[in-house]
Image: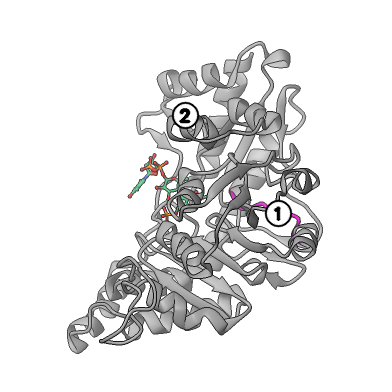
Amino acid sequence: MKKIEKPILVTKPYLPDLNNYMQRLQSVWNTGWLTHSGPLVTELEQQLCQYLKVNDTVVFANGHLALDSALRILNLKGEVITTPFTYLSTTNAIAMNGLTPVFCDIKESDCTIDEDKIEALITENTCAILPVHVYGFPCNHEKLQKIADKYHLKLIYDAAHTFGVTVNGEGIGSLGDFSMFSFHATKVFHTVEGGAITSSNADFHKKLVSAKNFGMISNEDATTAGFNAKMTEVHAAMGLENLKLIDWEIAQRKALITRYLENLRGIDGIRLFNWDKEGVSYNYAYFPVIFNKEILGVNRDEVADKLGLEYNVFPRKYFYPLVSEMSYYSQNHVVQETPVAKYMSENVLTLPLYVELTLEEVDYICDAIKEIIG
Ligand code: T4K
């Protein structure tokens, strides 16, 4: 196979039509209102409530500060059960709120928290569960909510990867107490940097708005300590333009994943995930694949290295290493054994996936993988 000239990276942000974006910016120039919940931020929050099928949306400067703020306003103390198979942000938000992360293992079927292993980790200090809808695969909400209710725990979802996903027609951001979405440039929907907290319950709206503005509730008082985590009008303008394209973008991603599945299905040693779970409408955020080194004779790292060196294709090892293996956590925290998460982390590759990727490029990537594994 001839090596392609231009590198194919794991993702590439999609940008809206520049003229349309400039028109949005014109309104910023007209009003002179740049930040502090201006008209474009307000409009974006309203449109997101509709699109995500939630009753409340508060946008933030990024997903991490959104999650941090949600934990902060709940004023939690003690232990939070979460998974180590995630981006550092999830665990850092817990730790930086003075809470202790307790790592629960994940399921092999979709890499989300194994709800059957949660109860054994609950102690009198447990205050919340923070599962991750990793890769855009929804957690088992019904079981999680039952556990949360039984033990009077808060249930906060890291929904960074699940923009637009619905389960049995319900917006995924309406589940639990809160959900955090990331609008980072590399996500299905982006505002360059950005994020949001959504909920089916608008009772916390004022607290969330205050939390992103230093904790201030008026010009003269603050009831909590908070960051500056506000989204600007310039970022909201990008969000409003991208929201117009979102259904088309998700359809493009679906077509690419369908092509990947056609190419890779049935290969002994390559495990694909189930993309047909009943009741789930996916957003096709990532395309993870598990390489079984015992069967293939080559491991995930060799596949990744060869894809880069010999084929100019650069997938990523999301999420390797586990957060619990990173020094800050392994050296300062009691870290639970999570064998499934460890296996997944050591064998997964997320293959390139973005709107401008072509079907021919998907074929090229799959042919390269087939050559490498022989
Ligand atoms: N929870 C979870 C489960 C998350 O995955 C994340 C973020 C968060 C919470 C926190 O949300 P935010 O605070 O970020 O809103 C990326 C993103 O920075 C991060 O948002 C994301 N998760 C994480 C999974 O991936 P990197 O270090 O892998 O990104 P980077 O810079 O290597 O970019 C990946 C590829 O994208 C590159 O190959 C090049 C391409 N790229 C990237 C950027 C930024 C572009 O072509 N253009 C660009 O502007 O972290």
Give the residue at the far top of this rendering. 297
The vertical placement of 1 against 32, above or below, is above
Residue 234, how many percent across, how many down? 27, 72
| Residue 132 relative to residue 106: left or right | left
- Give the class, few, some or many, for how many residues have Cα within 10 Å of label 2's Cα (few <14, many ≥20): few
Q: Amino acid at mark 1?
A: Cys
The vertical placement of 262 against 165, above or below, is above
Q: Which residues are magenta?
A: 135-141
For the point 26% across and 77% down, the residue is: 35
Could you say whether the residue bearing mark 1 is in a helix, strand or loop?
loop
Q: Amino acid at mark 2?
A: Gln
Asked whether 45 or 78 is in front, the reply is 78
Residue 73 appears in the rendering: yes
Residue 96, how many percent across, how many down? 42, 52
Report the residue marked by disc 2. Answer: 331
Asked whether 372 or 236 is in front, the reply is 236
Could you say whether the residue bearing mark 2 is in a helix, strand or loop?
helix
In which quadrant will I find the C terminus?
Answer: top right
User: What colouring does the structure picture have?
Assistant: one colour
Report, in whole angstroms, how far the alpha carbon at label 2 lies from the one at label 1.
29 Å
- Quick check: marks 2 and 1 in contact, CB under 8 Å? no
Q: Tell me which corner region of the image, top left, top right, bottom left or bottom right, holds residue 190.
A: bottom left
Numbered label attached to residue 139 = 1
Q: Tell me which corner region of the image, top left, top right, bottom left or bottom right, holds residue 128.
A: bottom right
Q: Say which label, 2 or 1, has the lower sequence index.
A: 1
Residue 329, how many percent across, how many down? 48, 35
